[in-house]
Amino acid sequence: MKHKEKNMNDLFWETGKDGGFRVPEDYFDRLPEQVMEKIRRADRTPVSRVVPLPRKRMISLAAAAAILFLVLAGTLLLRRSSQDTAPANGTMTAYVISGDLDEQVLYDFMEQENILPEPPVQSAGDDSIINYLVREGVDESLLAELY
Amino acid sequence: MEKYPDKELISLFPDPDHREEAFTRIMEKYQRRLYWHVRRIVLSHEDADDVIQNTFLKVWRHLEDFRGGSELFTWLYRIATNEALSFLKRMKKSPFLPWAGYEEQLLERLESDEYFSGDAIARKLQRALIRLPEKQRLVFNMKYFENMKYEEMSKILGTSTGALKASYHHAVKKIEKFLTEG
């Protein structure tokens, strides 16, 4: 260990034990005053009032309770206003939010708004059906029952 | 006889009329030792200046809480060490860290530091030291550069003297190896 330290000592001796580090001139003369100046500035800066923990917690709890009350009240009001008929224009959203939407309500709403999709297939009359079946090769004797 | 004994300065601090004077005396007494300790950790003067000023601000805020359970210098040294290590931690977490890692960033800051006049050997030595794990580098600095006793180091770092001796021994081996092979 001593031998290794001697090698390192030689190396550090070459570079100087300061290792090449320097400081600005008068740095240590100025440092205490610089620090004191920062301290005085910090002391002059107004600090926001520290609310004691219990009161702070009460305010937080009260705010949380108020928000919860508003949310619950809003939800209840929306539920009460829902009906089993097509909702008036602009209230479909309320149905969706409340979860009361069912197929009939949706259908009634779309019919009211004229936004029902065109049926994919036109309703066919009896003759059309029979002609179709004949073309498809169904035995005419079987079709006789349909006339 | 010490000009301003620590006990006296600490007892003057709570008095508003003597607070600033007492604190200035403490800074004048310990600033060089604390500065160089920090400088060898963070390397550049600008960073060391920031860290040492933050250290003293912290001391100002907490000196009244100092109960004298340890020597004043030990307490100051501990704060300075923690501030310097926190600085390195923030540097490691920086989103602007180059891909090479924070050791390279430290070396780059050293290279561009106008208050570093080391030659190629000095740079190589710093490279060897930076490669050490942080605590090992601390132990090496405190033992080799600052001639600190293991007992004092133990109070500052909260590590047993046996572990510190082992750490120093490993640090020396690694530096020697880097300098001869690197």
Image (spheres, grey):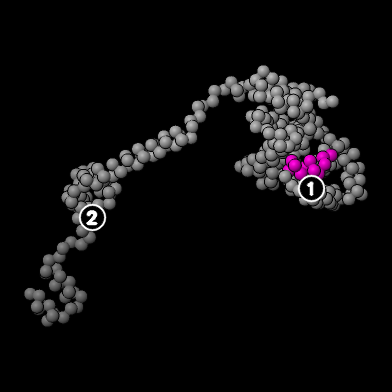
Subunit that carries the residue with mark 1 = B
Q: Can residue A23 be seen in this view?
A: yes
Magenta range is: B147-157
User: Residue at image x 66%, y 24%?
Assistant: B14
- The kind of residue on which mark 1 rests is Thr
User: Residue at image x 22%, y 56%?
Assistant: A103
The residue wearing badge 2 is A102
The residue wearing badge 1 is B161
Secondary element type, mark 1: helix
- Badge number at residue A74: none
Q: Is residue A143 above or below residue B5?
A: below
Left or right side of B65 for A15 = right
Task: Give percent across and percent down for residue A4.
Answer: 89, 49
Task: State the residue in front, B1 or A12.
Answer: B1
- The kind of residue on which mark 2 rests is Asp
Q: In which quarter of the image is residue A6?
A: top right
